[in-house]
């Protein structure tokens, strides 16, 4: 497949819809529909997606609003020119670059995404705020959260907390055994042999390093 | 009441076609009216496992493109006359059939059979969508290997998103290796997939032999894999059958019972 015509980028003020303006609207609409129907839980119900003013005309905006609405997603035109240039799409690709924007003061970490099932290989849960998974995170699954991540189950996938730079974010799981943990701009890799821990653990940043410690709950 | 079941896996070569042939013959041996649909267009081999290649006249692609009715394309099994194969084309590719066309065909066929089993191609592209669309539920086949389980997990996620009920068959188990800890055991597989298991099939040389002869092992009394397939057929028909014990050197090991939990 060539360059995607529809992209969703995270920014400080939420998810932003970025369009290939050379593509025709029917193709854009179809692409969005396919993504929404794909069943992966990229968009939780109640997710807000914004588009920069002037990108779409009124008629097309209304059509997309209706389409997103069918999937419980709120679509609107961003009211002020957001600092959308500062997206997380790039930082996700190159996470070793420290991300400076702090999400904590924007209040983004207040809302929580709750997923009541096991997240399986190839599935992704992305949220501006915190994420609570009541189920397992399987190998090959990815959780990306602006805030902290709490897994009431076994975590064997990839988890990224504080994805927009919040270094106070943490990851908790009943059995924390991911292949990789990312918090803000830091990455920690699992050792070659992962033993199943018998108590809940929390990963957080201490002295510029990701550390894992047992917790009670 | 007919049941439409797709047999799928994600990873290729784990035993979907073998499973389809054995369950089809097994159900037919119990007097059910069964049709097996091969959707692996371009790479068909279900006909070979059933010894029916020479009898094929029309294919699924002919039916979809309205050059034949599905009744004309059905190939009747030599021994079990209530078993039919709807073969696919060896020369066309997966784009020859789209999911909507398949759904329409299944809707048309479903009242004529007790069971419709659909053999799915490997992968998650159009062929997969076409194979699963008309199914009431799915059997996911996997092997006790990390990569096969990972791909099964991905497929399970896709199927759950389509609200399909799923049951698991673990194929090619080597009890000796499980015992030595060099092969994933049922507990570790269940830990990740957490799907109801309806079959644990041992690795059995007779499966290869039977494929060459066009007679599935489910018909062979002496085959362990054959017994495992007969047990699955029984479970599909609502019987409570516990999992087999496979002999390993000197001992008997019991694989964890995960059926029905
Ligand atoms: N239980 C078994 N014991 C021994 N060999 C087996 C067993 N099950 C399958 N095989 C062998 O594994 C090979 C692959 O099986 P099969 O063709 O059924 O897989 P498949 O999932 O349909 O493959 P594809 O993805 O290519 O369609 C065949 O050679 C078959 O004989
Ligand atoms: Mg096959």
Image (tube, rainbow, N blue to C red):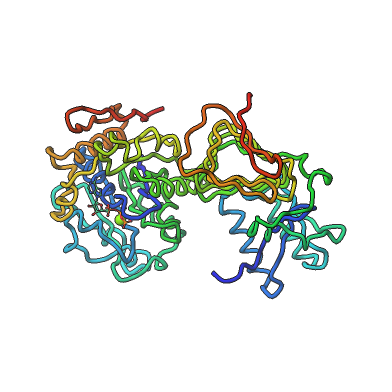
Q: Quadrant of residue A119?
A: top right
Question: Relative to residue B205, is residue A175 depicted above or below?
Answer: above
Looking at the picture, how far across and down is residue B21, in whole percent?
A: 24, 49
Image quarter (top left, top right, bottom left or bottom right) of the N terminus of chain B: top left
Image quarter (top left, top right, bottom left or bottom right) of the C terminus of chain B: top left
Question: Relative to residue A172, is residue B84 depicted above or below?
Answer: below
Question: Relative to residue B104, is residue B246 depicted above or below?
Answer: above
- Decide which of A114, B221 is in the foreground and name it: A114
Looking at the picture, how far across and down is residue A209, in whole percent?
A: 66, 43
Question: Relative to residue B69, is residue A209 depicted above or below?
Answer: above
Q: Quadrant of residue B201?
A: top left
Query: In the rendered view, does B172 fall on the left or right side of B137?
Result: left
- Decide which of A107, B132 is in the foreground and name it: A107
* Residue B104 in view of the camera: no
Looking at the picture, how far across and down is residue B231, in whole percent?
A: 25, 34
- Decide which of B185, B110 is in the foreground and name it: B185
């Amino acid at each position: 497949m060539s360059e995607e015509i529809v992209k969703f980028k995270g920014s400080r003020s939420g998810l932003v819809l970025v369009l290939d303006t050379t593509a025709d609207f029917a193709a854009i609409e179809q692409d969005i529909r396919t993504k929404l129907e794909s069943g992966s839980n990229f968009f939780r119900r109640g997710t807000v997606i914004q588009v920069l003013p002037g990108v779409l005309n009124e008629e097309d905006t209304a059509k997309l609003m209706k389409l997103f609405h069918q999937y419980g997603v709120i679509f609107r035109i961003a009211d002020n020119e957001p600092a959308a240039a500062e997206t997380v799409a790039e930082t996700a690709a190159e996470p070793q670059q420290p991300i400076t924007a702090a999400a904590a003061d924007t209040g983004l970490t207040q809302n929580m995404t709750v997923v009541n099932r096991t997240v399986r290989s190839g599935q992704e849960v992305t949220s501006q705020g915190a994420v609570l998974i009541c189920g397992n995170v399987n190998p090959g699954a990815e959780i990306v959260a602006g805030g902290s991540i709490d897994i009431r189950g076994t975590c064997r996938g990839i988890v990224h907390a504080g994805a927009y730079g919040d270094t106070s974010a943490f990851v908790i799981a009943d059995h924390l055994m991911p292949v990789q943990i990312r918090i803000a701009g830091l990455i920690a890799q699992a050792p070659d042999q992962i033993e199943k821990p018998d108590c809940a653990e929390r990963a957080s940043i201490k002295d510029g390093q990701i550390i894992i410690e047992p917790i009670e709950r | 009441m007919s049941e439409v079941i797709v047999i799928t896996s994600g990873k290729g070569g784990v035993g979907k076609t073998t499973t389809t042939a054995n369950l089809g013959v097994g159900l037919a041996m119990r007097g059910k009216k069964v049709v097996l649909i091969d959707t692996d267009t371009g790479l068909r081999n279900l006909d070979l496992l059933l010894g029916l290649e020479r009898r094929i006249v029309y294919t699924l692609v002919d039916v979809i493109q309205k050059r034949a009715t599905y009744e004309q394309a059905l190939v009747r099994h030599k021994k079990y006359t209530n078993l039919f194969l709807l073969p696919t084309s060896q020369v066309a590719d997966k784009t020859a059939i789209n999911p909507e066309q398949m759904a329409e065909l299944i809707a048309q066929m479903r009242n004529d059979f007790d069971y419709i089993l659909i053999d799915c191609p490997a992968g998650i592209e159009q062929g997969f969508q076409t194979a699963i669309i008309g199914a009431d539920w799915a059997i996911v086949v996997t092997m006790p290997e990390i990569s096969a389980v990972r791909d099964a997990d991905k497929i399970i996620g896709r199927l759950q998103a389509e609200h399909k009920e799923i049951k698991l068959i673990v194929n090619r188990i080597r009890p000796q290796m499980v015992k030595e800890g060099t092969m994933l055991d049922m507990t570790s597989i269940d830990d990740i997939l957490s799907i109801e298991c309806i079959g644990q099939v041992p690795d059995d040389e007779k499966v290869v032999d039977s494929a060459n002869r066009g007679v599935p092992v489910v018909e062979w009394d002496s085959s362990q894999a054959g017994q495992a397939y007969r047990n699955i057929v029984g479970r599909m028909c609502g019987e409570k059958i516990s999992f087999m014990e496979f002999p390993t050197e000197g001992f008997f090991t019991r694989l964890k019972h995960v059926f029905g939990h």
